[in-house]
Image (cartoon, rainbow, N blue to C red):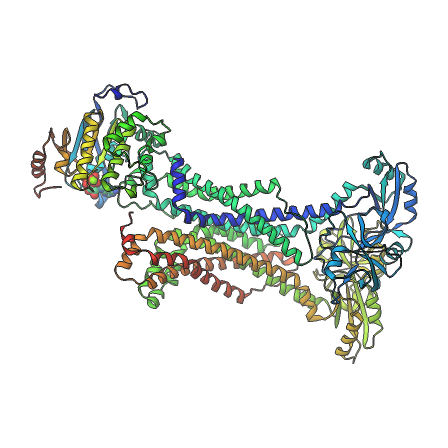
Amino acid sequence: MRRVVWRNLLAHKVRLALSGLAVVLGVAFVAGTLVFTDTLERTFTALFESTTADVDVSAERAFEPTGAPGGAPPQPLDAALAGQIAAVDGVASATGYVQSPGVYVIGPDGKVVATGGAPGIGTGWDPAEGLGMTLTAGRAPAARDEVVLDEATAERTGYGIGDTVELLTPGPRLSATVVGTLRFGESGGLAGASLVAFDTATAQELLAAPGTFHGVSVQAADGVGREELAERVDAALGEGLAVATREEASEKRTEQLAESLGFIDVFLLVFAGIALFVGSFIILNTFSMLVAQRTRELALLRALGASRRQVTGSVLAEALVLAVLGSTAGLLLGLAVAAGLRWAFGRVGLTLDGSLVVAPRTVVAAYAVGVLVTVLAAYLPARRAAKVPPVAALRDDHAMPDGSLRRRTRAGAVLGVAGGTALVAGTALDDAPATLVLLGSLALVVAAIALSPVLARPFLRVAGAALPRIWGPAGRLARENALRNPRRTAATASALMVGVALVTGFSIIGQSANASIGSAVAERMRSDFIVSSAVTQPFSPQVAEEVRGLDGVASVGVARLGFVELDGEPTMLFGVDETTGDDVFALDVIAGQGGAPADGQLLVDADLARDRGWEVGETVAVRGVNGEQRELELRGIYETAPSVGPALLPLATLGELGGEPLDRWVFVQLAEGAGAGAVREAVEAVVADHPIVSVKDMGEFVQEQQGQVAQLLMIINAMLVLSVLIAVLGIVNTLALSVLERTREVGLLRAVGMARRQLRRTIRLEAVLIALFGAVLGLGLGLVFGVGLVSVLDGQGIDELAVPGGRLAVLLAVSALVGVLAAAWPAHRASRMPVLRALATAQ
Amino acid sequence: MNPVQETSTTGPARTASAVAARAESLTKVYGRGEARVVALDAVDVAFPRGAFTAIMGPSGSGKSTLMHCMAGLDAATSGRAWIGDVELSGLGDARLTALRRDSVGFVFQSFNLLPTLTAAENITLPLDLAGRRVEQEWLDTVIDAVGLQGRLSHRPSELSGGQQQRVACARALAGRPEIVFADEPTGNLDSRSGADVLRFLRSSVREMGQTVVMVTHDPVAASYADEVLFLADGRVVDSLAAPSADGVLERMKALDPRGGA
Ligand SMILES: Nc1ncnc2c1ncn2[C@@H]1O[C@H](COP(=O)(O)OP(=O)(O)O)[C@@H](O)[C@H]1O
Ligand SMILES: [Mg+2]
């Protein structure tokens, strides 16, 4: 039996390669994701482990703010602490250090040097700090206008010793002379981050406050272990300080990083999932056809005494070999995917060093996923193979008894009704869980797959009605061929259907999100100009100060982003000044008072108030990252508005609670009669000193806010490409097989005078019909799915339904094109078949 | 009798009975209502061990159906059938499969070989399926007798129709079955290739002690057998021992006034 399996595999190399490709792609994405993640993590672990301090002491955070871009800013410590720690038994040295994000190098082109999402770090230079920096050229900074750059940044910008470099800091913009270059750790890898070292006093002044540090790095005396040292230091110090060994510190930072980069994994794994899901249809299809084609062979085996189990086993064994080969190729391709990702990330500044990391887990996962999906997909056809009656070998009409579709149809109909009900209930009921809609959508997808053979007939009849009239016999044959085996047509179309449904659904969600954001921002904010930074990096309050002094400016409002705990729950919110609260934010107040919260007050949105059961006038306990506590009175409750966030605090209160004194948004209101153009120019002149900050009018600001959604749409586009690619494979595969199956028929057609061109056209038209069938089913499903999800996401800021009609029309056209593309090779093959040989083919 | 057979231990258990396969009022009905066809009508038949039996009859008389039902390839509508001492009716698929594999050999009119396997691999396929060891000595005897030495590594597509059919015969005998069923084994062959196959089948009975039942509509082919059974409309209507081609033709003419099968 093993031999039969092996020979069959060898005899159908092309077919195998095609269905194997589906496995390869799916596995490649899984493996690529894992390899890339591991490489990323290794890079950062190496980075964090470069610090040489045995024990690190820093201010303890009251809680870890979640969702903060680039992590929360460090809290300052009193410089006297270093002396205190040095006195602890077992401490060889204790040095205070300053190190904080927010320092960006401006390249010779006047633009901020890209860090690919990694921070631009500023630090104090002190070789005793134990931060892992070594001077590689020049000398240490000794004055306020001297800096040392990391080697990679120096190389990227071309700055050398003696050059003048412009720097952005949280405070003023700075001009300094490069006096040296440094290397971080052993490899010098910074994962794209830039590092600028000042002399300690300047660093304190710019990044912390004079006389303060961000942390103290402690070196152990000989013979004292790190753990022990950490315990001793901890015991000697008071409350409010975090003491971590080198290992603990690097582990924690790695963890934080993994969390903030987790979205990449999610997207890649979604790709992998789609590839495998769609791929499993192709495998199912291939093996179904393989079984149908080999009915006589299988029957002969049965007649000669092969048991059902042996026949099932032989089909599954073929699948297994395919799975192993596909997974192996997928694993290799996965390395290429990871390398490609590394390259892409390197382009935007996030450089990952060293070789790719292939963990044993990656290999195991790749094979497990590949084998599981393939064998599962081949299982149904394998079961069917076992049911081939032995007499089938001896009869001429050896068609596989095509079991009735009745059971499948009934099951599909039941699922469809159940799914539809769940979907309607989920969207209509207010408190229905979102899972209801998801389950409903899933049930509908499965129902559509189950019902697709039944739906194929009417669709093909109608859609194919015009074909005979336009293309004559070629058109008629194409339609009949597609109709001939509705199961197969349906299964082929399913691969495309799933892809199209996903793309349609996500397009609707994306478009709706875009529209919602647009109207939310436009409705909730009233400002003539908005100053904001393009890289979500807050900027110096100096900007607002300067704009305030301009002619033609009536008022300036600012908003700062901060993290606090509201009654124990970490929350990201805005701190606003009076102008912003009163004039810029236009909130629908449901209860209490609107406007800017006065000292000792806060505003929250309706969702938060409902979740916590807060009422106007109630006292809310607020705690800052620095551990400060406040009791604030709830001034008012406003209708939930995603652009404004869940709560508003007074600007000063946020500052007392450890919020950065940096602005996120600056709103500029024109004075009556002032020329908008002139004021804009003046504001632009102010921000010219701040390359990351720019001035926008309301329309431009909306677009900027929609940028994230645009990214989502881009990812959806990538998904489209992927699922289309796999769908093409599926259709190529099915067509190639059905052409092979019809070899004799093709010979006959050619013998009675069908031209090659006509033959090719027949096959092409059949492919287009199948593709359109899949696309139409997918569009229908996607619409239901998208509209359902949008209505569920109502509360999360997507409150407007927008269907991207143009996009969907393009999708339909692309699907038809997919058919044409997929038919190219099978059509070519069929038309090249020598007529006599085709006629003589057995079976 | 061939000594090899008597000392055989790996073959299926031989029974003392002189009948290799038999049937009792075996009936097979296809379809229902208008389309109802009684292919076999209460057939009683027995195939003696170590004999070469031919089954003849006009087209559609139920020859193939009889063979399929007696070989466990298809289920009868009613009646009973035995291979050796094993009754087929009531056997589950697993037992039937094992029975076919171990006790029955098949030769069909066409599509006899798996196209992806070589001749040698096709011959040992039933043994491989059963996980049985190949009895090399016996195999050599069989291959010798069909005259396939030198062709063993060829694929079916590289063999002539007659050679393919001889491979199928060798395969049927490789496992030393209780009985070999051959359905028009020469139907697709020219007379010379057909004669090769028939000679081999006869020698397997005479020299190797096998039991062969062959369906044919060719009187010359039937004349190779020890006995001929005549079927008409699903019933055994006549038989002829030690037939000659002319004798068979006579009987056939008597059965079917239009002459021939
Ligand atoms: N699968 C089937 N379905 C319906 N009728 C069948 C089937 N197989 C055979 N028959 C009918 O049974 C009768 C006997 O067929 P068969 O045994 O093949 O005849 P023979 O081999 O003698 O030519 C014929 O009338 C044939 O039409
Ligand atoms: Mg017949």
Number of on-image labels: 0
Residue at 66% across, 56% down = A346
The image quadrant that residue B13 belongs to is top left
Left or right placement of residue B116 versus residue A529 in this view: left
- Would you place residue A108 above or below residue A407 in this image? below
- Would you place residue A508 above or below residue A1 in this image? below
Q: Quadrant of ligand 2?
A: top left
Q: Is residue A578 visible?
A: yes
Q: Nearer the viewer, residue A520 or A749?
A: A749
Left or right placement of residue B172 versus residue A97 in this view: left
Q: Nearer the viewer, residue A120 or A577?
A: A120
Q: Is residue B103 visible?
A: no
Residue at 59% across, 43% down = A362
Q: Residue A600 in the image: state x and y as whole percent.
A: 85, 57
Left or right placement of residue A607 versus residue B60 in this view: right
What quarter of the picture does the N terminus of chain A occupy?
top left
Q: Residue A230 in the image: state x and y as whole percent.
A: 83, 38
Left or right placement of residue A514 versus residue B14 in this view: right
Q: Residue A148 in the image: state x and y as whole percent.
A: 82, 56
Q: Residue B39 in the image: state x and y as whole percent.
A: 20, 38
Q: Nearer the viewer, residue A704 or A301?
A: A301
